[in-house]
Image: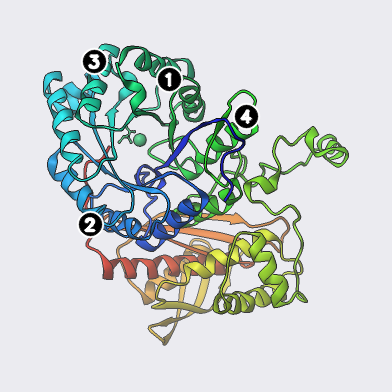
């Protein structure tokens, strides 16, 4: 594992909240298995603290924190709790098996939140802080406290709250910019102010937690670090409530690339960044925007002639970091019909997938099928293939066998579908407003349901008209949100398979859980 960027640098702890604040993003719900897979990845890549969920919010969150506590080897595992003792009990119980458990408790401290949300006087808030932090210490020595809406809290009161939390046993003080309102100079000023005014503050770790409503979450977090914060709370791909949280990959790479002016080190192995980004995008069905810093499809693409010419002469002309540093293969070695199993395994390893013999066999069959349809198989094709084979791991009650669609300028468009339902073949025909609608209607004829379609998204995996399409479908039924994905060179077939994959996931969720409890969360 790659550790500090170089010696003698201040260590900044990376606190990942993809599975808590990230998952609070509407529609970004992940299954337990997906959360465990992502937690394992975060642990392997050297994240210091994994905030695994908000145990009192739902049974699903409780289980996620519990299971992640059991399987995490290196990182601390953190559970969120409001200041009520029942929240803290729930977090304590979920973290029982963690090697390094952390409870993160919080209460609002801004005038607006105290008056309208909490309807509490400031003295009562101070009492709640003391009570909650002391109570959390009964479960673990590692207690983090946050003043919600901290950046809009009056400074005198913020100092009092921080002093109270420290006196009661908090070991990390996190300052959230809950509504993404602050700016870099102010973010730095708050940290500096606390360091100057709160006696003994150097005995705790100061942390920053920024939202991106004004597009400044990463800049605000880095400004806080420069001013003395030594923990950054962030998420993979910047996932999170509203406009999201500060993006982990941007924070880590900014400190690495601009180490001359930000001489801080993290424990993150940056070569795992792309894999983590893909896993989160895949689990949530939230695609990464093409021009997203570090992990976007275009982040290392050079299209203009002038740039390409410069790159050929010296990569440093237009590239401030190497694609390999974030886990992108240095060469996009094209695979094809004649590539063998060993070459496929090597390529998958380069892309960060460590496959066992059985999985390799399955993927090899799919790879051969794809290479019959498509002459050149690029890295992106293989990644898509790995992702869809992982998606298929959920029990397949429904399986598309054949689909024939008639479309074009003469309506109606029609679909003829053969689908297996628990192994029994059904053949149906349907019409629709366009080929996708016709295909979905055909599925609905066989499997009627009340789930609402929240999202239908198509993305070409590579360039060219023979490119595979990755289709994502998000459905909602009684508060349960599920995602389905599939890839195929035939976009309509990929759509039908993604829809069916989402329905399989819905059936799985129905069998495992009660509908999501909708709870008031931070
Ligand atoms: O944004 C926020 O205030 C939070 C807290 C719970 C830290 O997520
Ligand atoms: Zn937040």
Residue identified by numbered label 2 = 59
Mark before the other along the chain sequence, 1 or 3: 3
Q: CA distance from mark 3 to mark 4?
A: 35 Å
Rendered image quadrant of residue 294:
top right
Q: Is residue 351 above or below residue 171?
A: below
Percent position of residue 67, x then y:
32, 60
Q: CA distance from mark 2 to mark 1?
A: 35 Å
- The secondary element bearing badge 3 is classed as helix
Q: Nearer the viewer, residue 500 or 408?
A: 500
Q: CA distance from mark 3 to mark 2?
A: 35 Å
Residue identified by numbered label 4 = 259
Q: In the displayed structure, does residue 360 sit left or right of residue 200? A: right
Mark before the other along the chain sequence, 2 or 4: 2
Mark before the other along the chain sequence, 4 or 1: 1
- The secondary element bearing badge 1 is classed as helix
For mark 2, does the 10 Å Cα neighbourhood hold few (<14), some (14 to 19), or many (20 or more) residues? some
Q: Which mark is residue 187?
A: 1
Quadrant of the image for the C terminus?
top left
Ligand 2 occupies quarter: top left
Q: Residue furthest bottom?
A: 424
Q: Is mark 3 within 8 Å of ligand 1?
A: no
Identity of the residue drawn at 65% across and 58% down: 380
Which of the two discs, 2 and 1, sits closer to the camera?
A: 1
Mark before the other along the chain sequence, 3 or 2: 2
Q: How many marks?
A: 4
């Amino acid at each position: 594992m790659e550790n500090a960027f170089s010696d003698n640098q201040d260590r900044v702890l990376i606190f990942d909240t993809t599975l808590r604040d990230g998952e609070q993003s509407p529609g970004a719900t992940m299954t337990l298995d997906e959360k465990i897979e992502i937690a394992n990845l975060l642990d392997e890549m050297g994240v210091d603290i994994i905030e695994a969920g908000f145990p009192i919010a739902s049974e699903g969150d409780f289980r996620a924190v519990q299971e992640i506590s059991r399987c995490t080897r290196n990182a601390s595992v953190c559970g969120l709790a409001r200041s009520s003792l029942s929240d803290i009990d729930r977090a304590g119980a979920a973290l029982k098996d963690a090697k390094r458990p952390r409870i993160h408790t919080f209460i609002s401290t801004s005038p607006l939140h105290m008056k309208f949300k909490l309807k509490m006087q400031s003295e009562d808030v101070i009492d709640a802080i003391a009570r909650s932090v002391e109570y959390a210490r009964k479960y673990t020595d590692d207690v983090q406290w946050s003043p919600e809406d901290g950046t809009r809290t009056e400074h005198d009161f913020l100092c009092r709250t921080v002093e109270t939390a420290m006196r009661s046993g908090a070991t990390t003080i996190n300052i959230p910019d809950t509504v993404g309102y602050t700016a870099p100079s102010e973010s730095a000023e708050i940290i500096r102010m606390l360091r100057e005014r709160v006696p003994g503050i150097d005995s705790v770790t100061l942390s920053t937690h920024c939202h991106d409503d004004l597009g400044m979450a990463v800049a605000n977090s880095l400004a806080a670090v420069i001013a003395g914060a030594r923990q950054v709370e962030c998420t993979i791909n910047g996932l999170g409530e509203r406009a999201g949280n500060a993006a982990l990959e941007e924070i880590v790479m900014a400190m690495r690339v601009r180490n001359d002016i930000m001489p801080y080190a993290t424990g993150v192995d940056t070569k795992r960044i792309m894999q983590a980004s893909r896993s989160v995008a895949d689990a949530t069905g939230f695609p990464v925007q093409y021009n997203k810093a570090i992990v976007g499809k275009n982040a290392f693409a050079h299209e203009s002639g002038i740039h390409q010419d410069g790159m050929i002469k010296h990569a440093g002309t237009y590239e401030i970091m190497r694609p390999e540093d974030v886990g992108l293969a240095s060469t996009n070695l094209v695979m094809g019909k004649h590539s063998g199993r060993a070459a496929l395994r090597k390529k998958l390893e380069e892309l960060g997938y460590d496959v066992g013999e059985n999985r390799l066999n399955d993927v090899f069959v799919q790879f051969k099928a794809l290479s019959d349809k498509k002459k050149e198989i690029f890295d992106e094709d293989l990644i898509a293939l790995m992702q869809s084979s992982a998606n298929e791991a959920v029990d397949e009650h429904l399986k598309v066998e054949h689909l024939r669609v008639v479309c074009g300028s003469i309506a109606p468009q029609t679909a003829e579908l053969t689908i297996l339902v628990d192994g029994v073949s059904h053949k149906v025909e349907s019409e629709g407003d366009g080929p996708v609608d016709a295909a979905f209607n055909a599925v609905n004829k066989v499997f009627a349901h009340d789930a609402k379609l929240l999202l239908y998204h198509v993305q070409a995996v590579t360039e060219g008209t023979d490119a595979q399409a990755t289709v994502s479908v998000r459905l909602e039924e009684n508060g349960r949100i599920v995602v389905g994905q599939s890839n195929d060179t035939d976009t309509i077939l990929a759509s039908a398979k993604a829809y069916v994959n989402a329905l399989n996931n819905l059936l799985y969720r129905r069998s495992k859980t009660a509908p999501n409890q909708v709870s008031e969360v931070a």
